[in-house]
Image (cartoon, grey):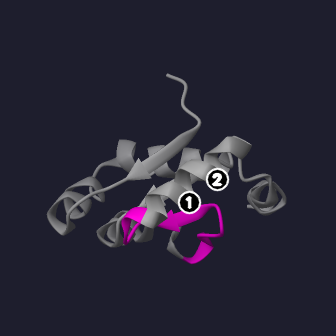
Amino acid sequence: MLYDAVAVLVSAEGASALSRESAAKDFVNDAFAHCKFIAYSADAMALFEKAGLAGDLDAGCLELNAPKDAAKFVASCRDLRFWEREPNVKMA
């Protein structure tokens, strides 16, 4: 499976369920480690916390609160990756 960006748009209940799934935690960690742009709803923070990412979210991770945020995310994806993250993930 190949993808260039991730959108984690979940309800609080969905995020709670996903945060108990190792595959879901691996998925968001892999997306982060591969410098992919990540869009997310506020409720997704529960998953990011369980995955150990909550404190590491950077400018390549965009919370979607309004329609204009989605447009900003799509525009960001034109760069394919958030390369500024790469030095930080290689140190982990």
* Whole-percent x, y for residue 63 in the image: 46, 69
Question: Closer to the camera, 6 or 45?
Answer: 6
Q: Is residue 81 visible?
A: yes
Left or right of 84: which side holds 63?
left
Verify whether residue 56 appears in magenta: yes
The residue sitting at 84% across, 59% down in the picture is 87
Q: Badge 2: how crowded within 10 Å, few (<14), some, or many (20+)? A: some
Look at the image and give the residue range highlighted in magenta: 55-67
Residue bearing mark 2: 76
Residue lying at 19% horizontally and 57% vertically, measured from the top left: 14
Q: Residues within 10 Å of mark 1 (few under 14, many from 20)?
A: few
Quarter of the rendering containing residue 40: bottom left
Which element is circle 1 on? Answer: helix
Residue 52 pos. (x, y %): 50, 67
Disc 1 + disc 2, Cβ < 8 Å: yes
Left or right of 7 on screen, residue 3: right
Which residue lies under the disc numbered 1? 72
Label 2's element?
helix
Residue 40 is a magenta residue = no
Kind of residue indicated by mark 2:
Ser
- Disc 1 residue type (three-letter): Lys
**Which residue extends farthest bottom?**
55
The x, y position of residue 58, in whole percent, is 64, 70
User: Which residue is drawn at the image coordinates 80% and 60% (left, top)?
Assistant: 84
- From the viewer's perspective, tell me whether residue 82 is left or right of residue 45: right
| Residue 92 picture quarter | bottom right
Given the current orientation, which residue lies at the most extreme right position?
Answer: 87
